[in-house]
């Protein structure tokens, strides 16, 4: 199947023997899905975690086959896509829960929203903000989604990464993130189903317009949803622009077009910027400092009126 060495190494690194067993079984899983759904498979696409490949259905419709390893916590993607029902997101055609496999709509041409940065950053922000404005699904039934409160619990564990200190991270910013997370959770807010990782690399161009892909699924404050957007896309784009000015502008546009309270958006940007940096350190990646923490400091300045 022409899996890249980096893909193989990543799964062995993540899950050891379990990762190797999944890699060994992956050809069988792929064959099962191609037969079950009568699809013709193309080459694997670039993906760090799940197996992703372009596919074509029997009726000629472009599709994506995704198979998620059993040791990754991404069980809710099919449910999330089913609830969205194609509104601003790729459609789910089929799923096989036992194999953790999904057959989804393929975005054609599939250009990432990141392509608009830095030439039209405002437009990219408005696209994402429109999704957030319209995605107001309140869950009144039983579900398995992680809550935002559970996600931010990691903040109190950051010192455990550095022998009880903040390590290379900014103590002021980290303390502010803890305080703001508690404040945002304890004050009145709109609790909805969130994408959970909405940024430039998870919004793709299609013949139906821009569509969201790769949801993590999360339940919580709607004002949290833009938070990972602010320190993306990946790369050195901020070196070409005034980063502080860009982040302030993004937060203002998100609040305006997403119909959100600006200070709540800024507060969650602080929280998520710190979380994202801490997650990188947790992965034993000590090559920081991370840009997300810098974004958190800019968002804190806006929250504080500076």
Image (tube, grey):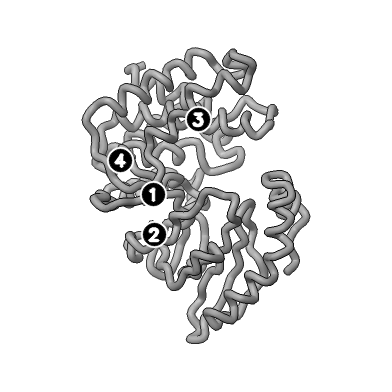
The disc label shown at residue 275, or none: 3
Query: Viewed as shown, does residue 116 lie left or right of 149?
Result: right
Query: Mark 3 or mark 1: which comes first in sequence?
Result: 1
Q: Are marks 1 and 2 in contact (CB under 8 Å)?
A: yes
Packing grade of label 2 (10 A; few <14, some 14-19, many >=20) is some
Mark 4 against mark 1, which lies toward the viewer?
1
Q: Secondary structure at mark 1?
A: loop
The answer for how far apart the CA atoms under marks 1 and 2 are is 10 Å
Would you identify the image quadrant in which residue 121 lies?
Answer: top left
Q: Position of residue 198 (x, y in %)?
A: 43, 47
The answer for how far apart the CA atoms under marks 3 and 1 are is 22 Å
The disc label shown at residue 222, or none: 4
Q: Position of residue 10 (x, y in %)?
A: 71, 48
Is residue 19 in view from this perspective? yes
Looking at the rendered image, the quarter that the N terminus falls into is bottom right
Q: Nearer the viewer, residue 266 or 221?
A: 221
Query: Mark 4 or mark 1: which comes first in sequence?
Result: 1
Would you identify the image quadrant in which residue 24 lies?
Answer: bottom right
Q: Are marks 2 and 3 in contact (CB under 8 Å)?
A: no
Query: Mark 2 or mark 3: which comes first in sequence?
Result: 2
- What residue is shown at x 62% (from left), y 16% (from top)? 167
Looking at the rendered image, the quarter that the C terminus falls into is top left
Packing grade of label 3 (10 A; few <14, some 14-19, many >=20) is many
- What residue is shown at x 34% (from left), y 51% (from top)? 143
The disc label shown at residue 144, or none: 1
The answer for how far apart the CA atoms under marks 2 and 4 are is 19 Å
């Amino acid at each position: 199947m022409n899996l890249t060495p980096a893909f193989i190494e990543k799964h062995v690194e993540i899950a050891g023997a379990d990762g190797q067993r999944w890699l060994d079984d992956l050809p069988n899983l792929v064959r099962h899905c191609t037969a079950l759904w009568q699809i013709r498979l193309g080459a694997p696409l670039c993906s760090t975690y799940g197996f992703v490949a372009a596919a074509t259905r029997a009726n000629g419709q472009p599709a994506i086959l995704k198979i998620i390893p059993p040791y990754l916590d991404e069980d809710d993607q099919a449910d999330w896509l089913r609830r969205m029902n194609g509104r601003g997101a790729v459609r789910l055609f089929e799923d096989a829960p036992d194999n953790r496999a999904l057959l989804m709509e393929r975005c054609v041409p599939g250009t990432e929203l990141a392509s608009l940065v830095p030439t039209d950053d405002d437009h990219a922000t408005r696209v994402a903000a429109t999704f957030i404005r319209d995605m107001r699904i309140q869950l009144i039934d039983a579900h398995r989604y992680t809550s935002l409160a559970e996600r931010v619990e990691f903040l109190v564990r950051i010192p455990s990464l550095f022998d009880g200190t903040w390590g290379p991270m900014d103590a002021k910013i980290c303390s502010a993130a803890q305080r703001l997370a508690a404040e945002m959770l304890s004050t009145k807010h709109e609790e909805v189903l969130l994408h959970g990782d909405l940024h430039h690399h998870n919004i793709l161009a299609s013949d139906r317009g821009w569509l969201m892909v790769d949801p993590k699924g999360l339940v919580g404050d709607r004002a949290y949803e833009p938070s990972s957007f602010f320190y993306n896309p990946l790369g050195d784009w901020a070196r070409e622009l005034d980063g502080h000015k860009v982040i302030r502008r993004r937060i203002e546009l998100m609040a305006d077009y997403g119909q959100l309270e600006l200070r709540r958006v800024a507060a969650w940007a602080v929280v998520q910027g710190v979380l994202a940096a801490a997650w990188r350190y947790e992965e034993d990646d000590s090559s920081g400092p991370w840009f997300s923490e810098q974004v958190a400091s800019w968002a804190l300045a806006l929250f504080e009126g500076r």
